[in-house]
Amino acid sequence: MAIGDSGTAPATDILGRRKILPAVDPTKSAFFWLSGFYVVYCARPEDWIPGLSYIPLAKVTAILAMWGLFNALGRTKRTLKDVPVEGKLLLAMIGLLFVGAFLSPVWRGGAISHTMDFSKVFIAWILTFLLITTFQRLKQIIYIQTASVAVICFISVIKGHTRPRLEGVLGGIYSNPNDLAFSIVLTLPFVLAFLLTSRSGIAKICWIIGMLGMGVALVLTASRAGFLNFIVSGTVTLWHFGVRGRRLYLIAATGLIGVLLLATAGGKLYDRFTALSGDTETEQSAYESYEARKYLMWRAVDGIENYPILGVGVSNFETYSLIWHQVHMTYLQVCVEGGIPVLILYLLFFRRAFKNLRVLRKAEKELDPEMILFAGALHSSLIGFVFGALFAPEGYQFFPYFAVAFTAVMLQLYRDQAAEPGLAPPPKKPRHFLEVYGDYGRAGAIAPVR
């Protein structure tokens, strides 16, 4: 029986004979609504399906997921006592943001409202950890995020290919081209993981098409931060899947596709990079953006010096900046708006994710090969975010927080297996770690090592 499966329960038939019936999973309903929340947040159907904008889908699905979990209390595999350190760090961070919002020297009402919006990530985070009790469930949630971003990319390209940088094609987390670029880069490693683990040829073709669509959308955003993020995240991804996995064809294919995309659709991105020199023959607006970002960084440092403990309040830096723009560096954004203590909690929170992955990496020989692949994808995504956060204001985007939750879930699944080996016999240990990856390369899918 796989880890987290509901198991079986004894019963008797009408003749009194003992038989085994499947036990009812008390978290099934809650997980269904949690999946719905991920669909709503990641796919934003209210932005491209007429009529849905009038329904608060995110609130409805989140409330129903919490209600389902409440009804299952006492019968769940995990409880609030099992929440790992990173969950507590996130809660402490949000608590300090609320204190800073109520004492904001800039705009208290706005800071409180934006903090309440951001605090939803904690609910999603806790529900993710408590309700995802099997690796299959984890894959399902990651699948929702991955497929949603792929669909969003196609919609953005179709609806906004005539707009500069795909700006404002959709609302919410995809309205800003830099945010859209970040969402794409943070999700691409999962696309490759699903491609390599899919056994269906049709599924593989769909993932390849999805990856190409995401690449086109990334280039059309002309996001310099997103492109640099892609270089770093892509390099780590190719290390995990190409070098360690002995799939050198992935490296060659990525290089070829990258050159073709830049050659056919990368003109705007090239102009924005060359504009950093101040050459007015390329694009003056990009150079002005570069100069404005330098000013915003100095303004953020000034805000930290004046309000080092509680900051100016969530999303209040735009007002404090005097030019109504956000500082394009996540770490400065978090520090100036939340204070130095919040920045420390923020860094410790993401440090825990890398610690989780390090524990899993040391236990590779005891893990299912498919889990190893997704751990590599998570590592690539998080590395990309940590680097890309140096160039963009992504402190309140939910995707990185989801990634940390996924690492916590994956580590807990491994611990469940180690603590209760009777629930799921450990997979046969490969002779050598590279043999696992070698089977991926030869078969193109997960295959047991004999």
Image (cartoon, grey):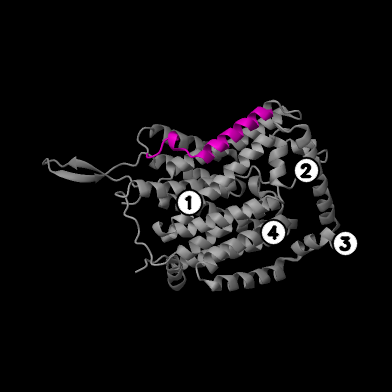
Q: Which residue is mark 1?
A: 359
Q: CA gap, disc 2 to disc 4?
A: 21 Å
Cα distance in 3D space between marks 2 and 3: 24 Å
For mark 4, give the secondary structure: helix
Please identify, in this view, whether the residue under mark 4 or under mark 1 is nearer the observer. Answer: 1
Residue type indicated by callout 1 = Val
Q: Earlier in the sequence, mark 4 or mark 1?
A: 4
| Upstream in sequence: badge 2 or badge 1 | 2
At label 2, which amino acid type do we have? His
Question: Is disc 2 placed on a helix, strand or loop?
Answer: loop
Residue 79: x percent and y percent?
41, 35
> Residue 43, position in %: x, y?
57, 50
Q: Do tag 2 and tag 4 residues touch (Cβ < 8 Å)? A: no
Cα–Cα gap, marks 1 and 3: 49 Å
Check disc 1: other Cα within 10 Å, few if <14, some if 14-19, many if 20+.
few
Mark nearest the camera among 2 and 4 is 4
The residue that mark 2 highlights is 325
- In the image, what residue occupies the spot 55% across and 40% down? 58
Which SS class for mark 3? loop
Q: Which residues are magenta?
A: 77-101
Q: Residue at x 70, y 28 (%)?
A: 109
Q: Earlier in the sequence, mark 2 or mark 4?
A: 4
| Residue 86 drawn in magenta | yes
Residue at numbered disc 3: 279
Checking the image for residue 228, the label placed there is 4
Q: Position of residue 65 (x, y in %)?
A: 46, 38
Residue 81 part of the magenta-drawn span: yes
Give the residue type that dot 3 points to.
Asp
Up/down of 393 relative to 66, above or below:
below
Residue 413: in sight, yes or no?
yes
Please tell me whether mark 2 or mark 1 is closer to you in this view. 1
- Nearest the viewer among 94 and 417 is 417
